[in-house]
Structure formats: structure tokens, C-alpha cells
Image (tube, grey):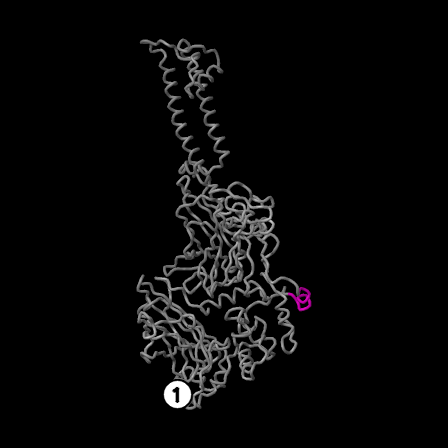
Amino acid sequence: SQNRSVGPGDLNSFDSFLVRESVDVDKIEARQDKWIDRGKGYFQKMRKKNKQAALVETGVHAGRSLVQLAGIKNMTWHRLRHDAFSSLISMKFEKLVLMCCGCYLLNWIFFAFVWWSAYYAEPDCMIEFEGFLDALVMSISTANTIGYGVRAIKGSLGTDIDCLYSIFILSLQRLVVIIMDALLIGILFSKLSQPKKRSRTIFISDSAVICQRDGVLKFMFRVGDARQTTIIRPCIEAYLYTFNPSRRRTTLEGEFIPNRVSRLELEVIDQSLLLPVLLSHVIDEKSPLFGMTKAEMEELKAEIVVTFVAVNSETGTEFAARQSYLPSEIFFGFQFTKIVRTVTTEDHYKYHAIDLAKFHDIEPQKLWSNVFMTQHEISRVLMNSVGNALTVPVPVLGDNTIVISGGASLTMLDRKLKLSFRVGDVFPPLGQFLHAKVYAYYYPWKATETSEGTILDYGCQELKLGTDANPKSNSLFLRVPVLVEHLIDKHSPLSDWQTREGFVADSSAEILVIVYGTNQVNQQAERVQRTYRVADGHIKCGHTFKDIVSPPSQSIDGKPKVNYDDFHEMHKSQRSESSKESAWVYSHEPFMSQDAPFSQGPPAGAAAAVAFAQSQGAMEDEREATLRFKQSLGLGNNPRDFTRLQDIFPDMPPSTSRKSNEGYEGHENDSSSFSFNASAEDNSSGTRSASASASGSQKSRKGGGSPTK
């Protein structure tokens, strides 16, 4: 393609955006350092400063193994003796050239002495020989087949056998030189044809992020190609290494396993790499990262190693690149800075530009840009949100397409109080899961006393479930979404919920729903789960699910249609006059409403704290429920203290470096969005960000409460 450069006006408007052609002709701006493909070196310095152990190096020498071999003496000699070719290929090019030159010099000098000995042994057979220098010239001429015609063996031998020694030396040196040429030239050619430097044009971000995309928690890193030429069959893999004494594994046979390696399944990528791509790994119940917070990563000494292997289209040989991420290099609630835009030149020609200067930069997601929380706190919230997103999966054949409603309904149905939730399979038209079963478990999270007098810290009871098709069976046929119900009567574990007082007293309870199914495409068993927390408002009192199924008569093709956009939607149901015994469900509001005050805030897990702090018109029963919930966690009775995240997670260590109220109010004009610069920010104590909107909302709160500390 024709090379086009960016005009001066364009560079001023778009900062340092680089055209792909300009990367190949070394038009990178002067402010770029030569290690831009390996990041800015910040994390490499932090590893050395903090003396962090790692399997793979980052920074300038990213990808180099840091594993030290021990237990064998003279390992270098062992490699040369048993794997000489690979040892020579792995040498630096300068050393390899010096070695080849040294081999030829030694050959010339050694055979110079041999020719000199032949001169003294058979002086009549040698022509124009007088000393060692003549022998050296004879050796060089023989090795390189120069043949100047001056120094040589006697021209006419006839039947004379006196010159056999000289003939033997001539033959031996030529054989040795032929073998040397074959070996050394082969080694040099293999070294030159190695596309080792091709990996320097493969960019792998020096940090990774864990954030939500469409409600799905993902581990992500960025990969890009800085050359125009395409690569063949790129293969990118990621592995999680963990080391920790508390989780060291011992098999049933008593075998000790000091570490664990788990493969992270990556989503499908664009193998052409025309533009930088974000590689993502979905963190769900099957992921090795499921429930792993930043503190747990540090405790496990976790390290994620990323490998990139592809075939160079010019030489047809494979090359590889590698990068690793320690817990301090994985940022929760962040996203990668956008680096691809469309640029217009002076002649109105448009093309896509890639700003490689910001390839490694990250920035906080809008969701977390106004929240005062450390990385450890954000990681706790994000990991608790797994499975609680109000989204539906993409209907891909062979994938897990089962979805559970984001909330549960507590209302009167057929004059009976029932707890219900919705389960569906989004793959059209009949779903792809067979033999699906649903289970629900009730966790009261409060001390209970058995009939024998034993005090239990918590309890777990299974709830009997049923559907309209079979009220006494938990089997599901997911042609269309199904409403799963649990009857609350005197025999139900939720019997206390028949009164408002019993429901409020059980505000710390959780309902865990698990759906199992077998995918008929690949015969894989899949699982989806969701947790309904009473205190977070997941149990909607007096609400029913919105109708989303249209009958076949309303469809052109004569098939039922499902509007999955409203799968999680619920609406307030009308009070039934015949159900006076449980009429309280129609007047009770959720404990922590997540609708208006916190539609843009953190996901489930922190919603209970922040939504209550921001709500102004809470009802009396909501305050009562909040106080009971705090008391169940062993907290005080001050409602304002409930805004702290430690009230939701009592075992979380408090932060000691948060800004005070006075210090925060002095920065009301700061921008709420920033780009993380690894060379200037220290991530050891967690990353924080805030904007003036947070300060304003705190100061305008009813009652004049102080901002969150």
C-alpha cells in the first residue's frame, strides 16, 4: 500500500497517533524510548525495588525466564555436550561470529604447524618452503583452495612414495575445512534466519486489568502488531501460576505438589491483528480466577504468564513473545485507553491511526471514577458481582446460554405466598440445553440453636422448587423462559417471611440458585448460579415478572417469540383483596433500592452500603431493616456509619491513606477521568480516583452528613 504521512496539523490535533506505515519506516516520535514495545519499564523497576519473585521477566527483557536451575554442576558444559546446536544458536550473534572466526584461525594455525613438520620430514616434497610463515600461508591456501601456484607439493611424483605424508596432510585439512564450513555456515544461517527480533514488533501490554464488560467480569490485556506484513496462525495462551503454603496440594497418595498451574480460556481473537486487540478471559464459576481478590492473589503469589506464538510470513519460521503479570500489575476497575481513531489528512484522505505511545496506558472505568476505594476493596466488590449482572449471554452455539433473573419475586400467587425467579435459555428457537435442573439453598447467616442445644453460626437448607408444568419437580424444559417457584408455608425454611417482622429480622439472609444443564451440541455439563441477598434488595416484595413471551399467533413464522431485553424486568403487582394475611408484601419497599440512586454505581455487594447512604426518603421499616442487618454483622446503630465499605465486609482491612474531607473538597475542579501513567503512579497501596460530582453529592446529602472516609 502507498505510504502516507500525517500532516503537522493532524499531529497537533491527535497528539502522537501513528500510522501503521510510519512504524515500519522508523518515524516514531522523538519522545518515544526504544523500549516502547516492552512498556515504560516502571513495573520492572518496582519488581526490583520490592524484590518480587517472578517466573518471567518484564520490561526491557520481557519474556526471559527467571527460573534458576540448581542441583547440577557445570550446567553449561552439560548443555554444550548434549545439546550443542541449540546452545550455539542461543548465543549472542557477536559471540557466535567471534567463535566462527576463532575456529578458522585455530584451524589455520594448527595445520601451519603440521605443514611445517611435513617440511622437515620431507623437504624434497615441498616447493618454496623456508620457514613457519611459509607453512602458515600453505595452510591458509589449502583451507580456502586459493592455489597461488608458488608453495605446493612437488609437481611430479610418479611412483615416488616419499611424499605420502604431505598428501595425507593435504587431504586431512580439506576434509576438516569442508566439515567446518558446513557446520559453521549452518549455525550462522540458522541464527540469521531466526525471527527472534520479529517478536519486538509484537506489543503486549505491560499491565492487565480486571473489569466488567456488559455486566460480565473479565481479565484483559492488549496485544498488537506494529508491522504491515501479516503473521500466520497466531496462538495466544495465558496460564495462572500460584504458590502458597496454605493451598499447597497433597494428593490422596501423599504426593506433595508445591504449585499449581491453570489455563485461562481466552475468547476468540482477530488473527489478522490489523488493529490492536483486547484479549479477554471471562471470570465465572469455571474460571481459575473465580472469587480471587487482589489480596488473595498476593497471598497465593499468583502470576499470569501470557505466551504469543506465530509463524513469520517472510521466513516461514515460528517466533514467540512472552509477558507476565504479578498482582501489583493487575488493576481492578480499570480499562485500556482507546488508541484507535480515524484521522483526516490535509488532502481529506481518511485512515485509521494507532497511538502506540498510549498502548500500555490504562484508565479507571466510568463506573469507578467517582468512588474512594482501594484496589483491594474494588476487587472484593467485583468478585462478589460475578453471576449477579443484569445481562443475558450472547446466543452462541456451544456456549453457556443459560440465564437466571437478576431479582426474585416475593408475592401472592393463587392465594399463596411464593418466592419465584425466572430461568431461560437464550439460544433460539428451542434452546440448546437438555436435562436442566434447578436448585435453591437458603443461608440465614445468623446463629441458630438445634433441638439438642447446639449453637450453629449459620445454616443451609434446600428449598423445594417447582414450575407451572410440574409444581413438585425441579426439572426444566427451557423452550421459553420458565418461572420457578417456592411455596412459603409453615413447613418452608422461609416460614418467617409470612410476616413483615420475620422478613425484616432475616435481612442478612441469602438465597443461592444453581442451574445445571447438558449442552446438546458438545455434551458438556454447564452450571450457572446467582445469589439473592435480602439486604441488597434482590428480593422484590409485591413484584411480578414482566411478560416477555409472545404466542405463536402473534408471530409471522408461527413460533413463540421471547423479548430477552426485558428478561430481568419486574413491576409492582396489584394487591389481592383475598390475601390479607400476607398483605405486607405489597407495601414493603426493598431494603437497598438499586434503581434510582445507584443506577450507575458499583455492582451488587457494595450497593447495599452506597444506595442506603444516598437515599433520602427511606421508610421507617427500611431503617429498621438496615439496623437489624448491621446488628447481625456486629456493627453499631449509627445509620451514617453504614456508608463505609467495611460495614458490608467486616473482615476487610481499613484503608489508612484515604483523603480527608477537607483535603478532598480542595480538589473540586479535578477531572474525573485520567490516564494511568506507570512511570509516575505507585500502585502499591491501591489506585483511587474521584471527581467533584462525588463531593457535591456528599455535601448535598440530607442531614449534612460528612463525606465517606
Q: Nearer the viewer, residue 420 or 638?
A: 420
Residue 670 in magenta stretch: no
Q: Nearer the viewer, residue 256 or 604?
A: 604
In this orientation, does residue 262 appear?
no
User: Residue 175: horizontal and vertical position, in percent?
Assistant: 37, 23
Q: Quadrant of the C terminus?
A: bottom right
- Residue under the point 42% across and 42% down: 312
Residue type at the position of mark 1 = Arg
User: Residue 104: horizontal and vertical position, in percent?
Assistant: 45, 25
Quick one: which residue is furthest to the front in this view?
Answer: 347
Compared with 294, 79 (above or below) is above
Q: What is the secondary structure assignment of the residue under circle 1?
A: loop
- Residue under the point 44% across and 45% down: 320
User: Residue 618: horizontal and vertical position, in percent?
Assistant: 56, 81
Q: Quadrant of residue 484?
A: bottom left
**Which residue range is magenta in the image?**
659-667
In this orientation, does residue 505 appear?
yes
Compared with 250, 589 (above or below) is below
User: Residue 541: horizontal and vertical position, in percent?
Assistant: 46, 81
Lateral position of residue 678 relative to residue 314, left or right: right
Residue that carries the numbered disc 1 in the rendered image: 415
Compared with 487, 308 (above or below) is above
Lateral position of residue 695 relative to residue 190, left or right: right
Q: Nearer the viewer, residue 252 or 221?
A: 221
